[in-house]
Image: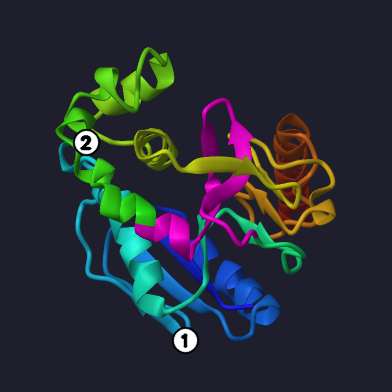
Amino acid sequence: MSVCFTMSVVDEYDLVDDRVARLQAIYRDCRIVVLPERCGAWPRGVEALPVERRYAVGKAGLVVERHLEAFLASGCAWWLKVDPDTVAWRPLQHLPEDACFFGTLHGQSLEGGCIGGTRAAAEALLESGALRSPSLLDPAASWAGDDPHLMARAEAGLVSFSAVHAWACREAGIELRDHPEIRSELRHPPDDPWRWAFTHPHKWLDVEEEPLPVGERYAAGERIARTDLHVTTSAAR
């Protein structure tokens, strides 16, 4: 399968090597392009595009545009945009052939942790000019709408990749499709992530242990810290 992965790296730099290794092990002939917010050293076989503040709200759809351009330049047939906290478990068994974008559909947009698309969809979206629409400079009238979380992001000076992408697709008439092998959530990964090909978000390297509820993880960490302190104090005595 001819697949290009693009990855925005704003933070969570410590996860990149592990996530890239997983992608390269599963898709041995894939292309991987990182779009970082700062310079860095990247794993072998990874291409890095020049650094620029793509997520600035004044740059409208630039961040989405750069990902799609990197994909088309790769010559691959399919695109998957992933984040450093997205984990690949196995290859996708099905990839659409028609012009669409796919992933975990939440409302009118695809959750940003893992968004896929075909070459035809990427070409159509770029050619539509929607990603350069002046309307994107007015978040309330375009990608943010009346969503308080998106408006808070806009007021902080940042765009939302998934919201801008979804708005531009609606303008261009391109379908967003739910994919049963991708499970991307906003805050917590699914309890049994290995059921899917891609899951998100995984904020730790030990992803096999991560399905524990967040509260339990913090409680376990506190218990370990208290145990270590007790052992250290006892040894000192």
Q: Is residue 183 above or below residue 150?
A: below
Is residue 104 rendered magenta in the image? yes
Specify the amino acid type for callout 1.
Gly
Q: Residue at x 35, y 18 (%)?
A: 145
Q: Secondary structure at mark 1?
A: loop
The image quadrant of residue 71 is bottom left
The residue that mark 2 highlights is 57
Q: Residue at x 62, y 73 (%)?
A: 23
Q: Is residue 130 above or below residue 92?
A: above
**In x, y percent, where is residue 236?**
71, 55
Circle 1 residues within 10 Å: few <14, some 14–19, many ≥20: few
* Residues shaded magenta: 96-123
The residue that mark 1 highlights is 45
Q: Residue at x 59, y 30 (%)?
A: 106
Q: Nearer the viewer, residue 98 or 110?
A: 98
In terms of sequence position, does the residue under pointer 1 or pointer 2 come before the other? 1
Is residue 151 rendered magenta in the image? no
**In x, y percent, where is residue 154?**
27, 27
